[in-house]
Image: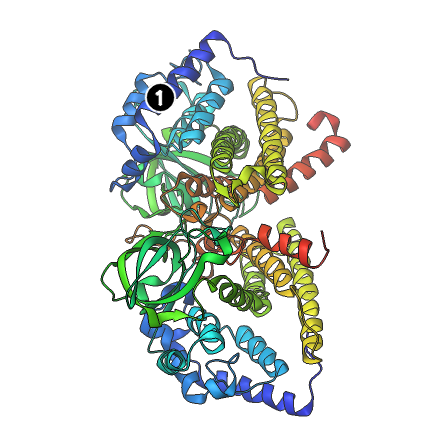
């Protein structure tokens, strides 16, 4: 489905398409980019985009953004996701960057923003804690003022790609006496500071994607505080809004549906009743994608006219994640009894049965279970819509 | 109908529960699967000592005569404890196939080593392009004197890397999908020209693709009459899928118990997670899924025990419905455990992975739904053929 585009926007779309086709690194085209690329490999595209000035579509021009309109940003999202490129690290570009240029001091902007744009600094997110999942405001990590420093103690968990990170942005409690939301601050911690320890968490798909981050008497300069002390909750909410915007994942679901169709055509004979059954189920998911895409386009058109989308992001997150889970489930089913091993669990699982296209099916199915949990679980998103849209 | 266990069956269940509690907690299981072999032969011998290997077989075959209800009890507890040892393949698959269709000589030769805990078997039925069709057999068996020579490839043979023998389906006549012309062979896994490409599956077990490149098998190893293997395969699959239903139910019971405990203990927003109505309703649905699966599983087990008419239809219906129900429970158990559900350190994901594997073995829920529909149709047009 295409947004009706003005001639200028259509030309922009063609430019984007051509740029991706000509510049996206071949070595990033691997079976499962989220899992298979090293830190350096995953930064290749980031650096190419930086050179072009396109690495941070969301950012205003003065901070190094491309100065795109809402429609252009959407075209960018659509084209990159259709092309299946691995986007620049969201924690850096989409999450902490906007918080810094919106709420940070001039010195903070000058120190951090250029290094985010260049890919020099890799950021991770210190939000969740063992006792603090959906109830994010219950963070217990403490930051106690000691002269020009905060002394930070606590335990962050599910920290995505912390093993690569140079910096972590953290929610910490600075006023234990205040109500949960009002005693939280937003601080930036250098991962090299003594007292920061990263411990891998292996997930059910065998991946090392998330980590525990232990903070033990970590001395953080006061100048690393964002905005005002105890106002961190409002910055965190601002950031979570950004996290959810692109979760419809239309391009991704569309690509995986195309792959599913190829697997079904290759693996199941047309006269096998399972073939018709799969066609029906694929069509159903395709309609789910179409309905969500139409909703997305409608909301983008409204935003371009200056209408506040409200909590539309929650709708995108709910449907986008559920659709993708369904695609991975159908794909695993289509591989029949071939889809049983993981590529690298154990690490010497060298022989993989069946055709190559079935080899990432189980890890994708298992890994995508996280989608309805993270970034505000889908239950929380439904609460948001119930409250903010329906007024319940 | 509810299966009221006899005193003997209760004893089997409680002694197995006690044994697994003492010898097969999750930490121990994780140590066993981390070994190079991936399973425990010592434990297998202890299971033998408890009488488990002989439990389902008839007394004539050297068993204890426990039948399908004994298998159900065992598989349900194995499901609860994520037992990886190949009871399904060796006893319910191979031993009971030999018992039902083997010659007296074959029974005398093959059953005692199985019952003694010496011999492990695996079932080489599936083929690379065959999906779940038992009659999709392209592996050929050609008679040469006193032997058959087997040539072909078998896929996703669960427990093959651990096995001493395989039951291989091969074609003695006909072409790819003919129902007639399939024969079954007991094949020594260490035979010359037989090779395995082994791999570990997501449920921490082992499987292999098997290549038979002109493997010579004595004619005396043919199980059942030449060319009439499909009926034996179907009977075997009915037993396997009903037993896997019991295993899935065991896993569902464990997942629901763990989820309930977690949501009662875990506090967010100052209250237990379990106090949120949306999660309460989800857990009610998980409970209903478990209860219906348990009921269907018992129903199918009793039908198997009495060799009821319409067994195949019921077995397929149960495999399909229990498969969907257990997948729902597994996915929701992960969801309700939040991030913890994604961690490989917790047992929840391991139950989910076992359920995923069960669902893609011996026919997935979609395959069995269609088979159920097909058998319903033929029962309506030809009542006697059900």
In the figure, is residue A198 to the left or right of B101? Answer: left
Q: How many marks?
A: 1
Q: Image point 28% across, 53% down: which residue?
A: A348
Residue lying at the far right of the rendered structure: B381
User: Which chain hosts label 1?
Assistant: B
Question: Can you say which quadrant of the picture contains the N terminus of chain A?
Answer: bottom right
Q: Which residue is drawn at 38% across and 78% down?
A: A108
- Tell me where residue B141 sits by quadrant: top left
* For residue B276, above or below residue A234: above
Residue in front for this viewpoint, A64 or A234:
A234
Mark 1 neighbour density, 10 Å: few (under 14) some (14–19) many (20 or more): many
Judge from the rendering whether residue A294 lies leftward or rightward of residue B73; answer left or right.
right
Q: Which of the pair A314/B370 is nearer the observer?
A: A314
Left or right for B2, reference B105: right
Q: Nearer the viewer, residue A181 or B117?
A: A181
Residue A112 position in % (x across, y down): 37, 78
Q: Outermost residue, left direction?
A: A194
Whether residue A288 appears in this view of the structure is yes
**Rendering coords of residue B223 (x, y %):** 43, 29
Secondary structure found at label 1: helix
User: Is B278 above or below relative to B56?
Assistant: below
Q: Position of residue B55 (x, y in %)?
A: 41, 17
Is the residue A63 above or below the residue A372 in the image? below
Q: Residue A109 location in percent, x, y?
A: 41, 80
Residue behind mark 1: B111
Q: Which residue is drawn at 47% across and 24% down?
A: B101
Q: How is the image coloured?
A: rainbow
Answer yes or no: is residue B128 visible: no
Image quadrant of residue B57?
Answer: top left
């Amino acid at each position: 489905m295409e947004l009706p585009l003005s001639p200028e926007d259509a030309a922009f779309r063609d430019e984007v398409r051509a740029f991706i086709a000509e510049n996206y690194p071949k070595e990033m085209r691997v079976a499962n980019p989220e899992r298979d690329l090293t830190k350096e490999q995953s930064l290749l595209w980031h650096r190419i985009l930086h050179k072009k000035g396109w690495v941070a579509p969301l950012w205003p021009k003065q901070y190094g953004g491309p100065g795109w309109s809402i429609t252009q940003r959407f075209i960018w999202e659509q084209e990159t996701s259709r092309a299946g490129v691995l986007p620049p690290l969201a924690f850096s570009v989409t999450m902490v960057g906007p918080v810094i240029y919106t709420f940070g001091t001039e010195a903070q902007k000058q120190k951090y923003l250029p290094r985010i744009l260049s890919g020099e600094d890799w950021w991770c997110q210190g939000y969740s804690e063992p006792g603090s999942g959906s109830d994010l405001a219950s963070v217990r990590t403490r930051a106690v003022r000691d002269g020009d420093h905060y002394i930070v103690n606590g335990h962050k968990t599910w920290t995505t790609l912390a093993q690569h990170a140079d910096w972590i942005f953290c929610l910490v409690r600075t006023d234990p006496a205040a109500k949960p939301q009002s005693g939280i601050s937003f601080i930036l911690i250098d991962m090299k500071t003594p007292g920061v320890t990263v411990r891998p968490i292996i997930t059910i798909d065998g991946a090392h994607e998330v980590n525990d981050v232990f903070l033990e008497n970590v001395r953080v300069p006061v100048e690393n505080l964002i905005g005002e002390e105890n106002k961190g909750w409002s910055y965190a909410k601002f950031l979570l809004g950004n996290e959810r915007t692109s979760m419809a994942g239309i391009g991704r679901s569309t690509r995986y549906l195309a792959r599913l169709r190829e697997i079904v055509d290759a693996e199941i004979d047309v006269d096998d009743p399972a073939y018709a059954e799969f066609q029906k189920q694929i069509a159903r998911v395709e309609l789910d994608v179409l309905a969500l895409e139409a909703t997305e386009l409608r909301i983008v058109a409204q935003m371009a006219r200056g209408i506040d989308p409200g909590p539309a992001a929650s709708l995108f997150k709910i449907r986008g994640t559920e659709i993708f889970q369904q695609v991975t489930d159908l794909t695993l089913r289509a591989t029949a009894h071939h889809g049983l091993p993981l590529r690298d669990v154990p690490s010497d699982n060298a022989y993989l049965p069946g055709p190559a296209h079935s080899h990432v099916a189980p890890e994708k199915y298992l890994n995508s279970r996280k989608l309805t949990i993270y970034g505000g679980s889908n239950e929380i998103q439904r609460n948001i819509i119930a409250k903010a849209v329906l007024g319940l | 109908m509810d299966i009221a266990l006899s005193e003997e069956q209760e004893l089997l269940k409680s002694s197995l529960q006690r044994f697994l509690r003492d010898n097969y907690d999750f930490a121990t299981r994780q140590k066993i699967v981390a070994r190079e072999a991936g399973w425990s032969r010592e434990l297998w011998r202890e299971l033998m000592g408890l009488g488990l290997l002989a439990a389902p077989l008839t007394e004539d075959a050297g068993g204890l005569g426990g039948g399908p209800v004994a298998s159900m009890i065992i598989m349900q507890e194995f499901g609860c404890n994520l037992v990886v040892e190949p009871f399904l393949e060796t006893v319910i698959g191979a031993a009971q196939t030999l018992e039902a269709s083997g010659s007296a000589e074959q029974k005398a030769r093959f059953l005692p080593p199985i019952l003694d805990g010496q011999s492990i078997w695996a079932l080489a039925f599936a083929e690379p392009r065959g999906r779940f069709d038992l009659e999709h057999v392209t592996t050929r068996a050609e008679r040469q004197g006193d032997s058959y020579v087997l040539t072909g490839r078998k896929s996703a043979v669960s427990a093959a890397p651990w096995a001493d023998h395989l039951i291989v389906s091969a074609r003695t006549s006909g072409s790819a999908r003919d129902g007639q012309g399939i024969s079954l062979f007991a094949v020594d896994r260490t035979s010359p020209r037989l090779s395995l490409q082994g791999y570990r599956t997501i449920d921490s077990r082992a499987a292999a693709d098997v290549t038979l490149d002109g493997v010579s098998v004595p004619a005396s190893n043919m199980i059942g009459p030449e060319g009439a293997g499909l009926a034996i395969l179907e009977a075997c699959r009915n037993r396997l899928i009903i037993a896997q239903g019991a295993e899935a139910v065991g896993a569902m019971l464990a997942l629901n118990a763990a989820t309930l405990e977690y949501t009662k203990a875990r506090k967010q927003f100052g209250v237990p997670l379990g106090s949120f109505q949306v999660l309460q309703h989800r857990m009610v649905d998980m409970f209903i899924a478990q209860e219906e699966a348990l009921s269907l599983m018992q129903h199918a087990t009793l039908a198997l025990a009495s060799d009821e008419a319409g067994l195949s239809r019921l077995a397929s219906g149960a495999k399909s419905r229990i498969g969907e129900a257990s997948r729902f429970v597994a996915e929701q158990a992960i969801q309700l455990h939040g991030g913890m559900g994604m961690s490989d350190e917790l047992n929840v994901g391991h139950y989910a992975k076992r359920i995923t594997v069960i669902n893609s073995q011996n026919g997935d829920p979609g395959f069995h739904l269609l088979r159920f529909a097909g058998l319903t149709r033929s029962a309506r047009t030809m009542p006697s053929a059900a």
